[in-house]
Amino acid sequence: MRIGIFGGTFDPPHAGHKKYADEVKGQLSLDRLIVIPTATPPHKQKQTGTSSEDRLNMLKLLFSDDGRVEVSDMEIVRGGRSYTFETVTLLRGQYPDDELIFMLGSDMLLSFHTWKNPDVILEKVKICAVTRDGDIDEAALGEYAEKHFPEQKDRFIICTFEPIELSSTEIREKIRNGESVDGLIDGQVMEYIKEKELYL
Ligand code: ATP
């Protein structure tokens, strides 16, 4: 199986995240996409009022009709800050024979070599630079990989699509201001937000 790994805060998950998932599944011919919400420290939960459980529930609603997407609570259950090398090591243990591809926003790519244990990450998974508007192309990716990881340069791939200009911050602000978010988030997710009185 070819499995993608997509992490984020998802506070709340929105149409941009859905499009992201659909694009990487299609372009990379993924059999499965594992979506992993990060654990948030208690002080951050207080800032937005959203618990990790709420974010997990909203993601499950967003992908409820998509049999290829699995929403994982592995980082939330572990709690605290999860390093990527730890997460991918656990996933490699669960999927010893599958191809694992870790999605990385292209804005993060150029600092990947400063992460904790990048060599371990590359040993466990391939890295897919997900670029917005082609801000990084094959040549730039190749140059970066050659410079920092010459032995593992073939572990880097690229995926490009036009994102929906939208962020969770914008959604939270709109809800707080009583503005409509129709079309920007999933209907079931909106129902959940209303019921739990989130982001007010
Ligand atoms: P916030 O506004 O709270 O910072 P966000 O909308 O950027 O949140 P995250 O949970 O940080 O959402 O995003 C998780 C992942 O989804 C990141 O890799 C990010 O690049 C990607 N992403 C976020 N928004 C979009 C979008 N509109 N289109 C495509 N990808 C997106």
Image (cartoon, rainbow, N blue to C red):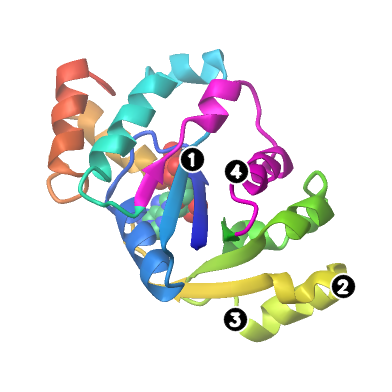
Residue 146 drawn at (x, y percent): 83, 77
Earlier-in-chain disc, 3 versus 1: 1
Q: Quadrant of residue 62?
A: top left
Quarter of the image for residue 29 reads bottom left
- The circle drawn on residue 151 is 2
Which one is earlier in the sequence, the residue at label 3 or at label 2?
3
Query: What's the magenta region?
Result: 69-97
> Viewed as shown, does residue 41 lie left or right of 9?
right
- Secondary structure beneath dot 1 equals strand
Is residue 48 at least partly visible in the picture? no
User: Of 70 and 191, which appears nearest the observer?
Assistant: 70
**Closer to the camera in the image, 7 or 69:** 69
Please name the residue that numbered disc 4 is placed on.
94
Tell me which amino acid carries mark 3: Asp
In the image, the residue with mark 4 has its CB under 8 Å from the nearest atom of ligand 1: no
| Kind of residue at badge 1 | Ile
Helix, strand or loop under label 2: helix
Residue 140: x percent and y percent? 69, 80
Q: Which of 78 and 186 is in front in this view?
A: 78
Q: How crowded is mark 3: few (under 14 residues within 10 Å), some or many (20 or more)?
A: some
Label 4 or label 3, whichever lies nearer to me, is: 4
Where residue 171 appears, as percent x and y from the top left, is 28, 39
Check whether the beta carbons of the residues at disc 4 and disc 3 lie within 8 A of each other: no
Does residue 19 appear anywhere in the picture? yes
Q: Is residue 139 magenta?
A: no
Mark number, residue 137 = 3
